[in-house]
Amino acid sequence: MRGWMLAGVAAMMASGAMAEPPETARIIDEGLNRSQLMTNASQLMDGIGGRLTNSPSLRRAETWAMGKFSGYGLANVHKEAFDFGRGWELISRSGRLVEPRSRPLMLIPVAWTAPTNGVISAPIVVAPMSKPENFEAWKGKLAGKIVLISLPGTTDEAKEGAFKRYSDGDIHDLDKYDLPSFDPDRAALRAKRRGFSLKLDAFLKAEGAVAWIKRGYRDNGLVSGEGYDYAVGTSPSLPGFDMAGEDYRLLARLAVTGANPVVELSSNVRFDDSDRNAHNIIAEIPGRDAKAGYVMAGGHFDSWIAGDGASDNGAGSVVVIEAARILRSLGVAPKRTIRFALWEGEEQGLLGSRAYIEQHLAARPLPPGLTGIEAYSAWSNAYPITKKPGYDALKAYFNMDNGSGKLRGLYAEQNGAAAPLLKEWLSPFASMGAGSVVTSKTGGTDHVFLQAIGIQGYQFIQDPLDYESRVHHSNLDTLDHMRPDDLRQAAVVLAGVLWAAANSDKELPRPPLPSRPVVTDPFRVADPNE
């Protein structure tokens, strides 16, 4: 909806045409007419850029965000440290086909891989490997080579447009209940597969390879540089690259047809071991009633390296900061404290939000020695859950992490009893398109582990735009793909929902404290090829 239409809603509410608390009208007026969101977005995305966990750029962003919260008058602005691992930053990179012709190549170093220490030039070999059983076929064939480790695949054929907004029918289709499924063996298998990258690196080094390249998982020149080997003492030995699908298949075709391609690579990266801790950033608007608990909003602050971390998740971060500014501008203390969080380590397995849970809310017994992303699946299946003293104080959490699209409502996370109150809190913003509450669960971001311990954590429904199709984790994740009007609307809706939750005489009904389920399919036979 256009800005002038939203301003009209504010005017109607301010004149009494809608029976809402006066603070709601003030929230709308402040958020739509005096927004600082895009100025902040430019400072963060254009000025600081991508924010890989524990990188120097994320450290700069931490200082910036704390300055914003403090400058807007929030209280208790602080960082909460948790153990992470190595820092790493990308300074420059290049790729070029040398033989049989000269041609630039679109690629990016994979995060936490080693530098090339200058330019390296070597022939390639196409050697797809996805599990240790593949290694035997390539012994003695990789010395002095740049190894292409992915299958070339074929060009993607888009089934729908790259840019999309939800129709009413799309939102209706989200209103469904998905039966839960519990299979701890599959979770253990996923964790085991995540350790393959270091085994591959060790094999390639032992065979004398000089670097490796994987194919980007989308076409159209997109690369991401996703990597997960950030733990101290386990860094990869070889330079690794993520290459655009079109260029990767070009190299594969040349190799298969006997053209003996030679590639030139440079990866100017450096590790930063000055502080192995990552940090969650916390700020508050104190409530009037210390016994009433608190409500919370958050989004993850870290990003990948290919772009500027704009839609994922600079957008969510600046919306959280703007919502804090809007609410603080009211000059009125809410009944409950409103807490704001910018999480780190989300891209490596929701590490920051899990650290907050383990410090303040609940404990789960992880197997000894299981850390990092390997703990991601195991944590949700670890029982029993032991409440900490702060468990009951958190009344509701609202997460921002689905790009820069307009908010359309909330996922009720299959808690039907909570839906009426969520809808009530959203009701002033229905004319802005944000009035829907759907039953579905949504995953992959920082509300997930709160739900897993029985605390009310919710993600907003957002128009997809080109989030998944183009910008998510990619070199196109820049401020150009953020929608200013959508983000102003999002900040207003988030601020309004937080204000309603903080002042409501009602509380969201909690589900039972989760306990270990039985295996859903007791007759499943394990596939030996998995």
Image (cartoon, rainbow, N blue to C red):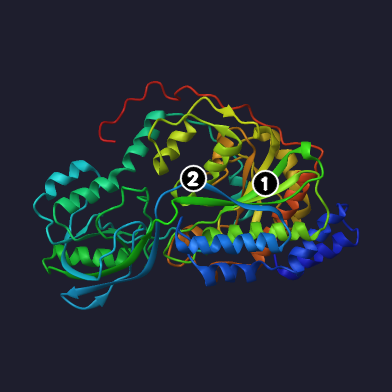
Write down the quadrant of residue 509 in the picture: top right
Label 1 CA crowd tier, 10 Å (few <14, some 14–19, many 20+): many
Instruction: Give the structural element (helix, strand or loop) at label 2.
Output: helix
Residue 5, position in %: x, y? 76, 67
Write down the quadrant of residue 483 in the picture: bottom right
| Total tally of numbered discs in the picture | 2
At x 25%, y 67%, the residue is: 117
Label 2 CA crowd tier, 10 Å (few <14, some 14–19, many 20+): many
At x 46%, y 67%, the residue is: 476
Residue 307, position in %: x, y? 45, 66
Question: Label 2 belongs to which residue?
Answer: 351
Point out the tag, 1 or 2, that comes first from the N-terminus: 1
Q: Nearer the viewer, residue 340 or 424?
A: 340
Q: Which mark is residue 208?
A: none
Q: Nearer the viewer, residue 30 or 67?
A: 67
Residue 351, position in %: x, y? 49, 45
At label 2, the amino acid type is Leu
Instruction: Give the structural element (helix, strand or loop) at label 1.
Output: strand
Q: Give the residue furthest to the bottom.
A: 102
Question: Label 1 belongs to which residue?
Answer: 296
Placement of 523 over or under 425, stated as above or below: above
Pick the quarter of the image with the N terminus: bottom right
Pick the quarter of the image with the C terminus: top left
Residue 70 visible in the current orientation: yes
At x 81%, y 58%, the residue is: 330
Whether residue 219 sits left or right of residue 293 in the image: it is: left
